Amino acid sequence: MTSIPRRASRPVLAAAVISTFALALGACGGGGGSGDSGGGDESVVIGYTGPLSGGGAAYGENVQTGLQMAVDDINKDGLEVDGKKVTIELKSLDDKYAPSTAASNAQRLADQDKAPVVVSPNAGAIKAIQQINDGRSKFLISAYTSDPAIVQADNPLTMMIPPNFESYAKPFTEQGMKHGGKKLALLGTQSEYGQQWTKAITDEWKKADGKIGADNSIDYATVSDFAGPVSKALSEKPDSIFVGGPSQPTALIMEEAKKQGFKGSFLVMDQAKLDEMATVTKLENLTNSVGVLPVKEYEDPGTKDFLKHFAEVAGEKKVATSETALNYQSIAIIAKAMEEAGTTSDPEKIRAAIPDALSKVDDKYKVNGFPTEISDEGHLVNPELEVTYLDKDEKYTKVPVEQVSDAK
């Protein structure tokens, strides 16, 4: 591993192979267990609504695996809140990526299961849940999305986990031009999130005096043969290609581009993970790319043990993605905030305790760029954010990221 020297950064701030482990946790809508550590004086439900069936199932199960690993580890270590031993239970409901279903699930988890925290990994779903979490029912949203609109909503009971994706536009553009050239082809996903990414990259690329080809974004729900769209994009003779969406189709698009003779650079949006994509195609088909840093390349105190534990839980062939690792961290933060607040039931006090809790989380839970602060708007901040460049020798180089503001 090599690193590019870090510039001064200013804080503010899915998946391909179905997890059989996550399926065993109740992928059809049942609740995950709380491990073998029951028998405490009190129990608390952490709710999860995510895609556990259909096209987004692998992504949703990656999130669920991280949540369950954290719940099991916290219960094993022991959690005490206000003098009482507490057991955490993860309860998962399938929303099939539908925002309206996610909102209904969240309401059910808050009302029926008294969950003070509900996790959601879908920007559209989170926006729907934000309409109900500070009204009749109050609960904290643990939001796994890089869409800055989530913290721009001024919802006092939201904790946003990943970095703002707009921070990636500048380093992606710099690396893409450095290793490719000035003309960019667009082959991202047609989802709302994909189009937001496309706009961010397009704006930054133009700012750097680059040229943009036609938007050949792909609807993964209807297109499975990528030869045509790739051929159309390559007909414009691009130096670089923007790709992204779930890891599996993104890998196949890059494989097809290499097959058709593309020699330039790839800009891979954060939904796709390079190491996970390497389970679908040869790593050589993914080289000359800039993307998010794989979990295995982090050097946090708990990274190695986390990866070992993940392999034991999910199998050696499954790749630990940031969906798994960042949600693992987030539950540890929430548990520590409960300790600091002295309550498992008051989401406002839990949210208020997060700033103090961050410095007190055990090192074992720091696995993927652990945050050092939370912004007033509710965004967890890791000021040492990095992306990666995968070179032609299949080596990862860390690239520092200057983070943008979450302001509108």
Image: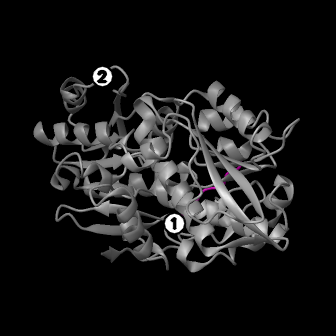
Question: Tag count in the figure?
Answer: 2
Q: Label 2: state its secondary structure.
A: loop
Expressed as whole percent of the image width and height from the top left, the position of residue 269 reads 41, 46
Q: Which amino acid, by three-letter code, is at mark 2? A: Val
* Contact check, label 1 and label 2, Cβ < 8 Å: no
Looking at the rendering, the stretch of residues picked out in magenta corresponds to 402-407
The quarter of the rendered structure image containing the N terminus is bottom left
Q: Is residue 298 left or right of residue 75?
A: left
Q: Quadrant of residue 184?
A: top left
Residue 284 on image: x %, y %: 16, 54
As for residue 403 lying within the magenta part, the answer is yes
Between 21 and 127, the one lying in front of the other is 21
- Residue displayed at 82% across by 49% down: 156
Relative to 178, does residue 368 appear above or below in the rendering?
below
Q: Amino acid at mark 1?
A: Leu
| Residue placed under numbered mark 1 in the picture | 385
In the displayed structure, 304 sits above or below 327; it is below
